[in-house]
Amino acid sequence: MTFLTRKMLTRRTVLKGVGATVALPLLDSMMPVLSAQTRQAPMRLGFVYGAHGVIHSEWKPRQTGRNYELTPNLQPLAGVRDHFNILTNLSHLEADSKGDGSGDHNRAAAAWLTGVHAYDRTQPGAEIRLAASADQIAARHLGKDSRVASIEMTLDPATQGACDSGDCFYVNTVSWRSDTSPNAPEIQPRVIFERLFGDGGNADQRRARIKKEASILDSVLEETRALTARIGRSDSSKLGEYLDSVREVEQRIQHAESGLEESVELPDRPLGIPASFEDYAKLMFDLQVLAFRSDVTRVFSLIVARELSGRSYSQIGVPGAHHGISHHREDPQLKAQKAKIDTYHMGLLNYFLERMRDTPDGDGSLLDHSAILFGSGLGDGNLHRHNDLPVLMAGKLHGKFQTGYHIDYSPDTPMANLLVTLLDHAGVPIAKLGDSTGQLLLDYGQAVGAAKS
């Protein structure tokens, strides 16, 4: 018989200091030798949104099955191709116009995780009425055992004023707590960091911390030393490496904020956002890796580009506004620019998936135990079509999914079927979401699927 000679730690053990709480990664000390069930790492879900559809000839593989050829958009993901599936011909028909005056971009973002039509709320007598989104349905179930039920993030500042329907309400988020309550995504890395790992979310606290240049880890130093004395050598090494990664992310945030003391009075200048968009995106992805690894949260959403985004990508040679470029009118030059933006986004996603793949988690990696959905509420941004959406799903979710395939479905198979399937496989009880008609059959043998009722 094997006897336990060291004191066991619970999975919810944290380090506490003044104004700080630091969750821990999964350690051997948290996994009793005699309990296989306790050893299993939790399931995690992530939802990443990219606006304005794609150029299908640059996105959609021509072959199905495992041996499909990566298209130009997917080339940056070559190193992780065995860790994701491409699912084509899925549609959000509830994002189509119903003649009520609502805009295509509003409906695209609103339907992406709900499968519900967004009516124009600017009309007389109209009310906000959508539905709880898939991420929030997951958060209610998976978030019961984590400190933060879910994290909602964005890389694209909220738009104000006139939109394509005269109403910008829906394009700024993809996450809804209920049919009337959207989640406003957070754009500031520091606010996200402090929500995950400690207090200090208001402007005065942020300024004080910048001036002090102290780490959140310094306040838990005493508890760290005490914990290190209680755990084995392997766990000490894991703990040290994890806390180093927390400090490294924090230092990057401080670096982005350095020199801003003189400009914090400018109301239009945000604190803590790196000047480089690529550095910004990677920092936000790294925060989520930390959040998953420490089990602070098990659900996140991130908007890489929102609908109607005016962001310029001059760093990759595309100086025009993303939304305007997506309306290419079959102009070869504009189509090439749109495809270049989409390929760039896949490079950023690849960074995140590689970090997830390379981060140990229990008997596998974070990516092994997660499902990450990337997509858009528009298929063809030029024509505002909501069919044949770009859909990439990465991760095996504890073996619930096989990966490395392109599966092409019957035209206009409901995208909501995939959302129901994803939630069901994550252990979230759900019978229907939006216009779903059943679960999505993932037929890896033929790599051709259909909806099963």
Image (cartoon, rainbow, N blue to C red):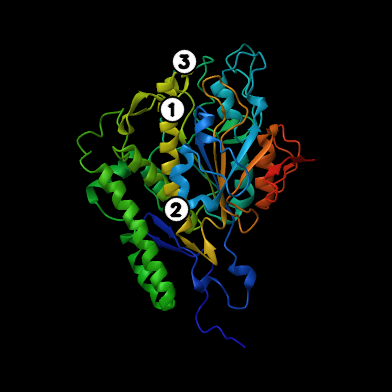
Q: How many marks?
A: 3
Quarter of the image that includes the C terminus = top right
Query: Which residue position holds label 3?
Result: 162
Assign a secondary structure to mark 3: loop
Which label's residue is closer to the chain start, 1 or 2? 1
Which label's residue is closer to the chain start, 2 or 3? 3
Image: 283 above or below 133: below
- Residue farthest to the top, as pictured: 124
Q: Please report the residue visible at 72 percent of the width from the left and 48 percent of the height from the top.
A: 429
Which of the two discs, 1 and 2, sits closer to the camera? Answer: 1
Q: CA distance from mark 2 to mark 3?
A: 39 Å
| Amino acid type, mark 2 | Glu
| Amino acid type, mark 1 | Lys
Q: Position of residue 333 (x, y in %)?
A: 40, 22
Query: Which residue position holds label 2?
Result: 354
Query: Which residue position holds label 1?
Result: 338
| Amino acid type, mark 3 | Ala
